[in-house]
């Protein structure tokens, strides 16, 4: 039996991207309250400052434009400055341009595939050596309903999130023998900045809720348990999986 309780991440260092809002912000707070020291990465310094204030001494802000792939190696170096090299990495940053297929632009396509798919891999690639040296690491990607379902106006986003599902499997194959478990969370409909357009339409939100097995859309706390499990010692024989936290949306 493990000596570390599932919800106890004391002594761990986590890096969470997209931590300024939505599920990324929730992830940073959940990990901090579970005992981890958290490096919160996002563009908006003011939002990160507010986050730091909610868990003083446990969260450090790292304002950064993740879209600049050329600076990923520099970001990885700075991620180790506040608390040491991260052994937990949560990729919650994402973008959805909501361009319908006929209107997808090269610029929108490149921005979406870069932030949603390329950045999680390359940032992981830079942080994995320290995890290998410890023989322990946890990487959590963010997949989506659109990893498996086609939605209107989601061609490039869906392509990127379908890629995340396969990326998760491939990263697990590459690194799990070194003690690094790589999995993904696939959120259903949660009220965040990214899904504001959905929740601004009450009828659409109600239809989405009816599509689930549970009969409601997600609340922020619904992500807590799955995230803690995937970041903990309890996940030691679970890797390469996409855990859909969607109330059964994809089961119907």
Image (cartoon, rainbow, N blue to C red):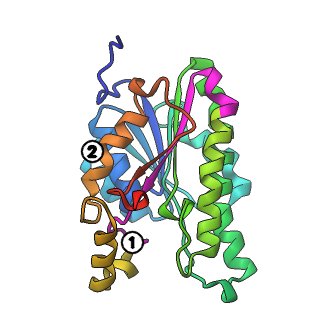
Q: Position of residue 154 (x, y in %)?
A: 57, 75
Start and end of the magenta stretch? 173-194
**Residue 151 showing in the rendered view:** yes
Task: Residue at 53% x, 40% y: name it.
Answer: 241
Give the camera-side residue of 90 and 169: 169
Residue where numbered disc 2 is placed: 55
Secondary structure of the residue carrying tag 2 is loop
Task: Residue at 64% x, 21% y: name it.
Answer: 177
Foreground mark, 1 or 2, reads 1
Q: Position of residue 100 (x, y in %)?
A: 61, 85
Q: Position of residue 96 (x, y in %)?
A: 54, 73
Left or right: 77 in relation to 242: right
Give the camera-side residue of 121 and 172: 172
The Cα atoms of the two marked residues, 1 and 2, are separated by: 22 Å
As displayed, is residue 159 above or below residue 97?
A: above
Residue where numbered disc 1 is placed: 193
Left or right: 142 in relation to 56: right
Q: Is residue 10 magenta?
A: no
């Amino acid at each position: 039996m493990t000596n570390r309780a599932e919800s106890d991440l004391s002594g761990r260092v986590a890096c969470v991207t997209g931590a300024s809002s939505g599920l990324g912000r929730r992830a940073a707070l959940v990990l901090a309250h579970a005992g981890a020291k958290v490096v919160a990465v996002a563009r908006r310094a003011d939002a990160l400052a507010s986050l730091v204030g909610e868990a003083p001494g446990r969260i450090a802000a790292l304002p950064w434009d993740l879209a600049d792939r050329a600076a990923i190696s520099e970001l990885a170096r700075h991620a180790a400055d506040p608390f040491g090299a991260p052994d937990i990495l949560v990729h919650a940053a994402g973008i959805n341009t909501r361009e319908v297929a006929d209107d997808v632009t090269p610029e929108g396509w490149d921005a979406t595939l870069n932030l949603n798919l390329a950045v999680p891999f390359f940032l992981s690639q830079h942080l994995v050596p320290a995890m290998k040296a410890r023989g322990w690491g946890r990487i959590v990607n963010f997949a989506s309903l659109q990893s498996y379902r086609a939605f209107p106006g989601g061609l490039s986003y869906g392509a990127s999130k379908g890629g995340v599902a396969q990326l998760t499997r491939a990263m697990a194959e590459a690194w799990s023998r070194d003690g690094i478990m790589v999995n993904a969370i696939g959120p259903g409909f949660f009220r965040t900045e990214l899904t504001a357009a959905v929740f601004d339409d009450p009828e659409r939100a109600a239809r989405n809720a009816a599509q689930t097995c549970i009969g409601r859309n997600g609340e922020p706390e619904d992500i807590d348990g799955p995230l803690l499990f995937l970041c903990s010692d309890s996940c030691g024989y679970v890797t390469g999986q996409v855990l859909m936290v969607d109330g059964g949306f994809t089961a119907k």
